[in-house]
């Protein structure tokens, strides 16, 4: 109970959220966008923003209550490796927030009785800036201070947007591979006490983070650090798992739920596998409606999708969320 008191605020927006959006980059590909460059969806953000808007709007129509911005791959380091100035990275980060805000405003105007959707600034891990898949193992050649600095740079931009530019409702640190990087994120976040975020890990099997640490132990250590240090009180809104195969979700929830008093977010990929040799996706996509119902029953609070999930998958999750809510209502 102590951890719950320390980490939750009465206005934690995740308490009323049930459905996230789905895959952004792969949905952009379905719309014809070219994501072959190292910046992935950030290329589309700059060159075809109307496609980003179209994807956001499709997920809102499908029932998503939160839109993640097209900024997962945006960072000063990532842009600098391509010879691009830091100002361009900062502008792209804020542009992504503005597009998500526009999509939410358009949806609200068309559906005036619907709840206002949240905007979460999507922030990928240090490995995403290396453009080599390092976020899926977390074996970085850098110091803890380097990790803190990397995350601080983006937080400084989002905490103080230029005049007239919107700020996100919250931050989504996604596909985090290790406990060390999670600790670096919280250290960076403590510099801006008004910012709130969820933190989502990616895992290599049914029990361990991509880097190898046990998921449950890592979350307990992370929350314990914050309680002991009196840091991040009210800033860490929830813990998630993302970019994992759907079949791993029940086991990971069993590891996570007993150790985590915060809202738990689950957003797996479609279940297909990427064949790097043939450069194509293989396998079959999962069916999400029954799976989401099971995950809600197992303790997930918020569910969405990651790579290769589409608006129809989010529509299925939204139906499962409605059923779960109705089944939990007391009867007369």
Image (cartoon, rainbow, N blue to C red):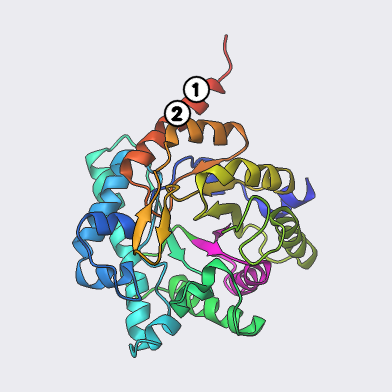
* Image quadrant in which the N terminus is located: top right
Is residue 315 in sight in this rendering?
yes
* Span of residues in magenta: 172-201
* Relative depth, front residue between 44 and 301: 44
* Image quadrant in which the C terminus is located: top right
Q: Circle 2 — which element?
A: helix
Contact flag, marks 2 and 1 (Cβ < 8 Å): yes
**Residue bearing mark 2:** 322
Query: Which mark identifies residue 247?
Result: none
Q: Residue at x 54, y 43 (%)?
A: 247
Is residue 23 in sight in this rendering?
no
Please say whether residue 189 is one of the residues in the magenta stretch.
yes
- On the image, the x and y values in percent for residue 198 come to 56, 57
- On the image, the x and y values in percent for residue 264 come to 59, 46
**Residue bearing mark 1:** 326
Which residue in the rendered view is the most extreme toward the top?
Answer: 332
Q: Quadrant of residue 31?
A: bottom left
């Amino acid at each position: 109970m102590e951890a719950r008191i320390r980490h939750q605020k009465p206005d934690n927006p995740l308490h009323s959220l049930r459905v996230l959006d789905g895959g952004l980059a792969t949905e952009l590909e379905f719309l014809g966008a070219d994501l072959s460059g190292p910046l992935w969806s950030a290329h589309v953000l700059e060159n075809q923003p109307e496609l980003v808007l179209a994807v956001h709007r499709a997920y809102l129509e499908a029932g998503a209550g939160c839109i993640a911005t097209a900024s997962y791959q945006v960072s000063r380091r990532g842009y600098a490796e391509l010879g691009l100035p830091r100002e361009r990275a900062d502008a792209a980060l804020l542009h992504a927030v503005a597009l998500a805000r526009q999509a939410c405003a358009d949806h609200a105007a068309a559906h005036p009785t619907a709840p206002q959707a949240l905007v979460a600034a999507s922030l990928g891990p240090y490995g995403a800036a290396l453009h080599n898949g390092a976020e899926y193992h977390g074996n970085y050649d850098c110091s803890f201070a380097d990790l803190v600095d990397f995350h601080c740079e983006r937080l400084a931009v989002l905490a103080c947007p230029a005049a007239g530019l919107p700020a996100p409702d919250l931050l989504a640190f996604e596909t985090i591979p290790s406990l060390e990087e999670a600790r670096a994120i919280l250290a960076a976040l403590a510099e801006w006490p008004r910012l709130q975020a969820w933190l989502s890990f990616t895992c290599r099997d049914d029990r361990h983070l991509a880097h190898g640490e046990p998921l449950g132990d890592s979350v307990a250590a992370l929350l314990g650090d914050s309680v002991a240090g009196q840091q991040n009180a009210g800033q860490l809104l929830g813990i998630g798992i993302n970019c994992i195969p759907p079949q791993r979700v029940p086991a990971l929830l069993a590891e996570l739920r007993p150790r985590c008093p915060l809202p738990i977010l689950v957003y797996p990929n479609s279940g297909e596998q990427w064949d790097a040799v043939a450069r194509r996706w293989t396998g079959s996509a999962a069916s999400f409606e029954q799976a989401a119902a099971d995950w809600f029953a197992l303790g997930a609070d918020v569910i969405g999708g990651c790579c290769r999930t589409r608006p129809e998958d989010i529509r299925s999750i939204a139906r499962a969320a409605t059923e779960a809510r109705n089944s939990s209502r007391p009867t007369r």
